[in-house]
Image (cartoon, rainbow, N blue to C red):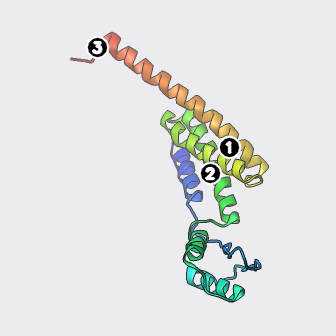
């Protein structure tokens, strides 16, 4: 029991979100697109904005700044997203497996982890490794089976309690 709880906790540890930013500057339609390469010194929105303004030779407009902020703050890096998706696939598999063996309630987060990993793979093909893609699919199936087992278990408990009374 201790080993399985430890395994689940370690799986959750590896799925912790890594905060990182990536930037693809939004340029005006009438200018020649110039690439702003992300370097270690460009870690904040202000540094990306200044680098972009320097590349295009003018100040950014309001909507361009909003777009640049969106891409620097809200868009994760592809490598971090790939690692997160692989970890989610593994976590979904572990929770799906534990839902059949230990606690059927683990099927619910297992379903969501596996589904999130498969959704990321569907949106950006190549995000998941081949083995982790298989683990995500198996985790999804195991979670569905675990959820069905949970429903059967609940129905069984209700039938037993109704047949023998509630103990009053």
Q: Residue at x 75, y 78 (%)?
A: 35
Q: Distance between the Cα atoms at labels 1 and 3?
A: 42 Å
Q: Nearer the viewer, residue 136 or 167?
A: 136
Q: Distance between the Cα atoms at labels 2 and 3?
A: 43 Å
Q: Residue at x 50, y 35 (%)?
A: 103
Mark 2 or mark 1, which is nearer the start of the sequence? 2
Mark 3 or mark 2, which is nearer the start of the sequence? 2
| Tag in front: 1 or 3 | 1
Q: Which residue is mark 3?
A: 165
Q: Which mark is residue 136?
A: 1
Q: Residue at x 67, y 75 (%)?
A: 25
Task: Decide: is 12 above or below 38.
Answer: above
- Which structural element holds mark 2? helix
Q: Nearer the viewer, residue 116 or 135?
A: 116
Give the image location of residue 138, x and y in percent: 68, 37
For the C terminus, the quadrant is top left
Q: Residues within 10 Å of mark 1 (few under 14, many from 20)?
A: many
Q: Nearer the viewer, residue 105 or 17?
A: 17
Give the image location of residue 88, x and y in percent: 62, 51
Relative to 89, 99 lies left or right: left
Q: Is residue 41 visible?
A: no
Relative to 142, 35 lies left or right: right
Discs 1, 2 touching: Cβ within 8 Å? yes
Task: Decide: is 141 above or below 85.
Answer: above
Discs 1, 3 touching: Cβ within 8 Å? no
Q: Which mark is residue 88?
A: 2
Q: Residue at x 60, y 82 (%)?
A: 60
Q: Residues within 10 Å of mark 2 (few under 14, many from 20)?
A: many
Relative to 4, 86 lies left or right: right
The residue furthest top is 163
């Amino acid at each position: 029991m201790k080993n399985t709880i430890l395994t689940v906790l370690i799986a959750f540890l590896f799925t912790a979100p890594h905060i990182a930013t990536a930037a693809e500057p939004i340029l005006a339609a009438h200018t020649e697109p110039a690439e702003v390469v992300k370097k270690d010194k460009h870690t904040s929105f202000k540094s990306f904005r200044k680098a972009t303004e320097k590349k295009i030779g003018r100040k950014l407009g309001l909507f361009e700044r909003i777009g640049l902020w969106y891409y620097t703050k809200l868009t994760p890096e592809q490598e971090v997203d790939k690692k997160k998706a692989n970890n989610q696939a593994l976590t979904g598999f572990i929770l799906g497996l534990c839902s059949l063996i230990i606690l059927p309630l683990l099927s619910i987060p297992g379903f969501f982890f596996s589904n999130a990993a498969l959704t990321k793979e569907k949106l950006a093909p190549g995000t998941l490794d081949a083995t982790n893609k298989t683990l995500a699919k198996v985790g999804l199936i195991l979670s569905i089976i675990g959820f069905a087992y949970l429903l059967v278990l609940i129905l069984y408990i209700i039938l037993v309690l109704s047949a023998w009374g509630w103990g009053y």
